[in-house]
Image (spheres, rainbow, N blue to C red):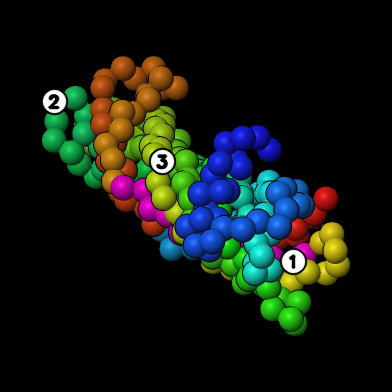
Amino acid sequence: MGDPLRTFATIAIVLVSGVGNVQAWGEPLSVTTGWATPLGGTKQWVGSAGGPSIDLMESFTLDSGDTVRMRLGYFAFRGWRDLPQTLALSGDTAAVYPATTSNQLFAFTYGADYIHPFPAKVYILGGAGVSYLQVSRSGTIDLTSNGFGPTLFRYNAESFVPYVCAGMGFPLNKYMAIEGRYQYSSLKGQTRGVDFSASGFQTPALATVNGISASALTLGLVFSF
């Protein structure tokens, strides 16, 4: 999967194993497809509806029998929410307005898992890495108190943030396993410009995006090649 992946893998191996002796490079490649359930701040943002998750992975076996697995992952959520929105229209102080919107959250992650197998065909894992986390909101905000009435709006907020994860898996055979994973990251509060173009509304405005503790539980099937 390329030199950057192996460079990151080598660094991860040295950090977690101290010795870093590798039995084999790139065995095996694997893909995880599954379903993610929102937790914590993610659930507050999008509601309880789950979303798809997918991971592309490459494993590197240590002399100890443990594995360092590099992982490029993605999950996404969307849900309709009636959450108030703090907004500052041009020339005004920030105020809270009723809003009904489609809220989205997605994350692209890149990091390393350290996997320890047990004789009972169960393995545990812990990992860390970097996540590109984005939240967006689009729908209707009620600006009646400012004389504008219900108005269509949207905004995005995003950032690169660290993540941590933990989980366990159960191999079904040489090529398949069931794996569950808990992942946590955090998006700091931000102020973002608002797009009113869908309403033909040109007044500049800034939306307050509260900090979100973005956590999720994923359950999926791992296919190894």
Which stretch did the figure color magenta?
A: 177-188
- Answer yes or no: do the residues labelled 2 and 3 have beta carbons within 8 Å? no
Task: Report the amino acid beneath label 3.
Answer: Phe
Residue 178 badge = 1
- Image quadrant of residue 174? bottom right
* Label 2 secondary element: loop
Q: Residue at x 83, y 50 (%)?
A: 225
Q: Position of residue 13 (x, y in %)?
A: 55, 56
The front one of 98 and 135 is 135
Answer few, some or many: residues within 10 Å of disc 3's Cα (few below 14, many 20 plus, some between 14 and 19). some
Which callout, 2 or 1, points at the residue further toward the start of the chain? Answer: 2
Query: What's the CA distance linking mark 2 and mark 3?
Result: 31 Å
Judge from the rendering whether residue 22 lies leftward or rightward of residue 46; answer left or right. right
Measure the C-alpha gap from mark 3 to mark 1: 29 Å
Other residues around mark 2 within 10 Å, as few (<14) / some (14–19) / many (≥20): few
Image location of residue 31, percent across then percent down: 74, 50
